[in-house]
Amino acid sequence: MSVKSITIIIALSVLSYSCESDAIEGPALFSPEEFEISVWAESPMFFNPTNMDVDAKGRIWVTEAVNYRNYNNDSNSFLHHAQGDRVMILEDTDQDGVADSSRVFVQDPDLVSPLGIAVLGNKVFVSCAPHLLVYTDEDGDDVPDKKEIFLTGFGGLDHDHSLHSILAGPDGKLYFNTGNAGPHQVTDKSGWTLRSGSLYTGGSPYNTSNSGGQISDDGKVYVGGLALKINPDGTGLEVLAHNFRNSYEVFVDSRGDLWQNDNDDQVVTCRVSWIPEKGNAGYFSSDGTRTWQADQRPGQDIFSAHWHQDDPGVMPAGDKTGAGSPTGMMRYEGDAFGRQFRGTLMSADAGRNSIFSYQPQVFKSGYELGTRTILFSSVKEDDEGYVWNDTSFQSQKAKWFRPSDLVTGTDGAIYIADWYDPVVGGHQMKDTTAVGKIYRIVPKDKKLSTPTLDYDSDQGLVEVLKNPAVNVRLKAFEALKAKGDTAIPLIEPLLSDENPFIQSRAIYLLAQLGEQGKQKTLKLLDSEDEMTRLEALRAIKASGNPSFLPSDQLLQDPSALVRRTYAAMLWDRDWEVRKKAFELLLKDFDPTDSWYLDALGKLATGHEQEAFAISIKTFPLTEKGEWSEELEALAWRIPSKEAIPALKKRLENEKLGTKKQDYVLTSLAFIPEKSAAEAIYSFSNHPDSSLAEMANYWLSFRQGNDWKEFLDWGKIGVDPEKTRKLAEMKAKRSLLLEEKMALNDRKNQAKAMAKDPLGGQMLMEMLVSNSLPADLIDTVKETIPSNPNLGVRVQAGNYFGSKANGENYAIDHLKSLNSDVLRGEAAFKSFCTTCHSVNGEGKDIGPDLSQIKTKYDQTTLLDAIINPNGGIVFGYEPWLVKLKSGESYYGFIQGETKETLIIKDLSGKRITLSLSEIDQKKQEAYSIMPDPASLGMKSQELADISAYLLNLR
């Protein structure tokens, strides 16, 4: 399809601007003193930048999202491009450090807020769900001559959680990612089909249907957001990792390592992570059918729950950055800022108005990010609990810096795109003029110039391969690869380059330079340098023929990272190959290494029983039956039926402790066998209340999924709905205490609890113990009177006091009213029989009032009704009993022994509690009887009730 006509219609021309004359007021960026920051380009040269790339001329290409979510942002009120969004080319033609040329490459109705771009030679890839598009400029005039749909079928049309950036990896393949707005049903050009989904819908009017449990052509289930890889010709689509929420950019560095940031459900749990091979990023359940909220366990912290960190088979979440809107990712591999800065990982966070930085280091068989620092920011003080839609940001220009992406230029400078808006998130924008900026960061007092990249000579290709700008290198990689063995003398000198990232690129290319190149790469596996061995291993795999790798050598490599990386290459091999690897890898197994443990678990897939038998043989129980940490971890990760008896016996050890109990229960809970369900059921009435509580939780949780066919749920005596509800309310309670979470979000959680019987009990306990945050008390006060539980309503009335209703309850006034016995009987049945009985009619909760006239005259009776706290009848003193589970009961204590306590709640139900279950009990100062005002009783009705009671026969 020709798109020349489209471009002509929009009057394509080179536009020149003076960036000094119409400068837009904006925030100043703070940075370390060794950096120099300047505005390189700004509107009207382009608008609303979402993603950037750099071409061989050093120009910056920008995808715009002017027509951003028009279903949510009125196009009549905001800048709008009726002919579609655009891709812009920006250039600093006179090399003075400021862009002076702006050109439209393409404007296309199919471009609806595109979120990714890669300029790869004369092909420009643009991410815009449902398509990954390619525009080809065949004659180099900056006008596309051809448009094609490279891939299609991605979910997330006009949605933030959709297709994102594209990068060329060191292996010559394309890396890209998509968010969780599925389903994604994508067929590559070789006919292989990816199917991925989850229960996530919403966010846009188009994201209406989605589901988990979808099976791709490789037989695997992929979930949610995805990290993907594909050959430049559109074949070989491969899932690198899955189950992200909305990772905005997956950055592949020259070593082949993947880095990502992911946003959260507004619960202060955004993250930055290193991605291991085939990593499950943990946002949904492993099949995509349940949210993290549904899976959150009692007592589990929000970060661990949000990313399923306590589930077997989930990758470590990385650095918890707090609240935010993470966007672009980049690892700086150039030399312009010195050796210490080389390798710095940068994560843009538009919500926090900042660029975070890390210095990743190898740790065990993966990476630790190190200390997070704020490299660039427009605010002096960071706020991990910022509120994304705070209206006060309208007047705070410092909060308008919204970094959407960052790239390294061919000159070695860092470029940051600024969306520039008082709000980010929720598919919203407030800046009606769609202003945007691009900042340029260079070393202080150092001039960086754009080099001329030479793709025509051998040495020129080598220099391009050394350039720090990622995507300009692909064309050079392909040209050198095409030379085969003859390119080896050009590449070998790079193996000793002072820059280790250049060494890495050379290794990846060497492995693809014919048979001689492969053999030279193979020899690098004997290097004393850990990273050289790692990259040689990865490069040989990427070359397409890893079968001749020295398996025993790699499985016994001194580096845990090398061993685990090789193990990942064997996950799809037959069991005999995997079994040998499993046995060798156990020799140097560190049970605290989560990445290594997961690699062992994946090797055991489909042969869990034999793998556990090998494990227990390698790490046998002691004579006293004690478990090693190695065996404990393996039993948790490998769901083996053979492990069930040993796990059950271990739970019977009274000295095990709560933490170990939870770990063993989790091990059992992930074994999809009836005997595992029966084992946990055997502890559901255990004398250890914490053990029994967790056993009941797992039973109630698994009833709805993996174990639904295993037990006769109607007969086992477990109340799964109550247990699930208790877990849900405890999770909400933990959110109330999350100080960095937005107040409105915490208020919503408090409202939900205040409307639920169990949630209301928890709130009242928090109020009584002064543990409810002060900024939530008014919200609870307003909402809790509608709680369906009478006990909660009574407690709340006593705690907060009654609402005045304008009635005169003065006793002398009431006695002066003309009372009526029949009206009093009707009023009594309406207001009082929920607790009291008369002549056998009513509830047996409060005292029977049939003989009340023998104890009170009208004055004392009216006083008892108006002031119920003035004299509480013996036996009807209210007690609040809090259990260790977090549940509480409110009512009258009717009996207590050395082992049990009997309490009658306000429904009249008698509950027997084990004293071992009770955390504390406290007698309340207020009667359970509400005063007339809280019941909305009129003065006349009160006078009539007194007449009725005093005239009973």
Image (spheres, rainbow, N blue to C red):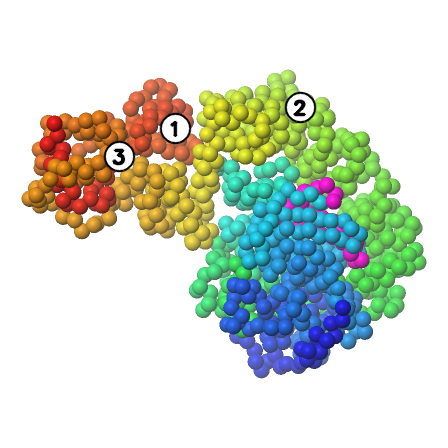
* Mark 1 vs mark 3, CA separation in Å: 28 Å
Q: Residue at x 19, y 39 (%)?
A: 827
Q: Residue tagged by mark 2?
A: 642
Does any portion of residue 323 appear in the rendered image?
Answer: yes
Quadrant (top left/top right/bottom left/bottom right) for the N terminus? bottom right
Amino acid type for the residue under numbered disc 2? Glu
Q: Which mark is drawn over residue 351?
A: none
- Asked if the stretch drawn in magenta spans residue 227, the answer is yes
Mark closest to the chain's N terminus, 2 or 3? 2
Q: Quadrant of residue 797?
A: top left
Q: Position of residue 624 (x, y in %)?
A: 61, 18
Left or right of 735? Residue 772 is: left
Question: Residue at the spot x=8%, y=43% of the render?
Answer: 818
Q: Amino acid at mark 1?
A: Ile
Residues drawn in magenta: 217-241
Q: How far, Cα to Cα, is label 2 from label 3?
A: 55 Å
Disc nearest the viewer among 2 and 3: 3
Query: According to the image, label 3 marks what residue?
Result: 834
Mark 1 and mark 2: span between their CA atoms?
Answer: 36 Å
